[in-house]
Image (cartoon, rainbow, N blue to C red):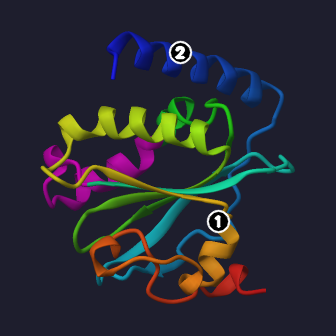
Amino acid sequence: MSTVAAITDYGISAREWMRMATSHRLARPADHLGAMLSFRDGTTSRVFRETCVPGASTSQPVLLVIRFRLAFLDDLELLHAGFRRECLIHTPLFAGFRGFRSKLWMEDVHTRIYRGVYEWDGERDAATYAARMVGLLAPFSNRGTAGSHLVPGLTRLDFLRDPDVTTGGASDGWWRLAQRATGAWSS
């Protein structure tokens, strides 16, 4: 991955994010805040923020899940609380990428692993973003915790409603739900 290409992509994203923000094309719904999602690796993550592009059409849905554990935060709740607040300023690093539709921001309070569950339009655009973000996160994360998983053809809503909609073995349990999400997603 070229550093120049990554900087260029983030610059383009920030510029597009500015256009979206000033024209009110981004939203931060509160419907899912506090929701708990259980994953097949035995972890549970709490949704602490959501960002979306309301009304954006998706012709080629792609589910993207990214995870990481920031090494410098250790297990100190005060640092994690600060990160959850300040990570809002990271929105320009993803929302302006071509194809972005939505992101659930999540944290597992026991393992301190953060996850983002995204919906994207277009596999190539989702893969480009995933490579950029994992490349950015890896140097600041505990070894082996920065990673991503793409599922072409799957919407975020279908993923949340039916954990068996995806296939795979136990080795990929970090991104797969153990059970159907309840609440606003169940209808």
Chain-order first, disc 2 or disc 1: 2
* Residue annotated with mark 1: 156
Within 10 Å of disc 2 (Cα), the crowding (few <14, some 14-19, many 20+) is some
The one of 184 and 2 positioned closer to us in this rendering: 2
Determine the secondary structure under disc 2: helix
Vertical arrangement, residue 167 with respect to residue 22, above or below: below
Question: Is residue 123 shown above or below 144?
Answer: above
The range drawn in magenta is: 69-87
From the viewer's side, name the closer residue of 2 and 93: 2
Query: From what the image shows, is residue 132 above or below residue 143?
Result: above
Left or right relative to 73: residue 184: right
Residue at 20 percent across and 45 percent down: it is: 141
Q: Which residue is found at the position 62% from the left and 87% from the top?
A: 182
Viewer-nearest residue: 85 or 138: 138
Residue 187 place in picture, x, y as percent: 79, 86
Q: Which residue is mark 2?
A: 11
Question: Which kind of residue does numbered mark 2 sit on?
Answer: Gly
Q: Position of residue 144 (x, y in %)?
A: 17, 53
- In the displayed structure image, the side of residue 7 where residue 82 appears, left or right: left
Q: Quadrant of residue 175?
A: bottom left
User: Residue drawn at (22%, 70%), measured in percent from left and top?
Assistant: 111
In-image side of 15 versus 151 (left or right):
right
